[in-house]
Image (tube, grey):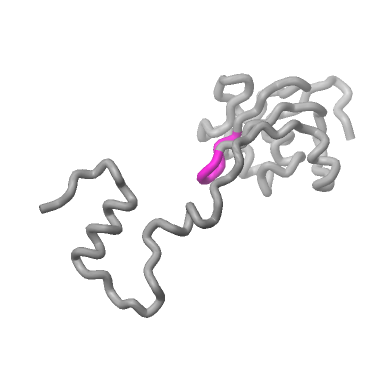
Amino acid sequence: MSSDEGTVRVDSWIWSVRLTKTRSLAATACRAGHVRVNGTRVKPAQPVRPGDEVRLQQEDRERIVVVSRVISKRVGAGVAAECFVDNSPPPPSREEIASVGLRDRGAGRPTKRDRRELDRLRDPGRPPER
């Protein structure tokens, strides 16, 4: 399961430890600049070694992991959890995510006042409309 030379491609490692669902998603994240190894943006072929810090920006949160073991093949969730130390901040709660802009089902179309309140909730720095 472990690589002989002690390094493996970052996109392959991210996929192997189950931080992304597919290797192509991991490679796409690298090309888009969402993956940093030891503070620098990396290409998909960048090698990672034990002790490297990998930062992966996913949808609405950042995953910060330290490589403790290098693997090149996808493994089960239990084994994958042993291959890194997770230093990520906790994900936002469901209440925080769902609280912005929810309307009761069947409440109908929002009035102009409702729309302005929703806009204010979504962008708090926006000046009030007159």
- In the rendered image, the residue lying farthest to the left is 130
- When the figure is inspected, residue 65 is found, relative to residue 115, above or below; the finding is above
Query: Where's residue 80, x and y in %?
Result: 80, 40
Residue closest to the eye, 120 or 9: 120
Query: Where's residue 45, x and y in %?
Result: 66, 27
Query: Where's residue 71, x and y in %?
Result: 82, 33
Asked if the magenta segment contains residue 73, the reply would be no
Residue closest to the eye, 58 or 113: 113
Query: Where's residue 120, x and y in %?
Result: 27, 52
Say left or right for 6 vs 120.
right
Q: Quadrant of the N terminus?
A: top right
Asked if the magenta segment contains residue 59, the reply would be yes
Main secondary structure found in the magenta portion: strand
> In this figure, what is the number of numbered marks?
0
In which quarter of the view is residue 9 placed?
top right
Q: Which residues are magenta?
A: 56-61
Residue closest to the eye, 51 or 3: 51
Say left or right for 111 vs 99.
left
**Residue at image point 51% right, 44% down:** 60
**Residue at image point 85% right, 41% down:** 79
In which quarter of the view is residue 26 placed?
top right
**Residue at image point 68% right, 49% down:** 21
- When the figure is inspected, residue 110 is found, relative to residue 73, above or below; the finding is below
**Residue at image point 47% right, 59% down:** 98
In which quarter of the view is residue 101 placed?
bottom left
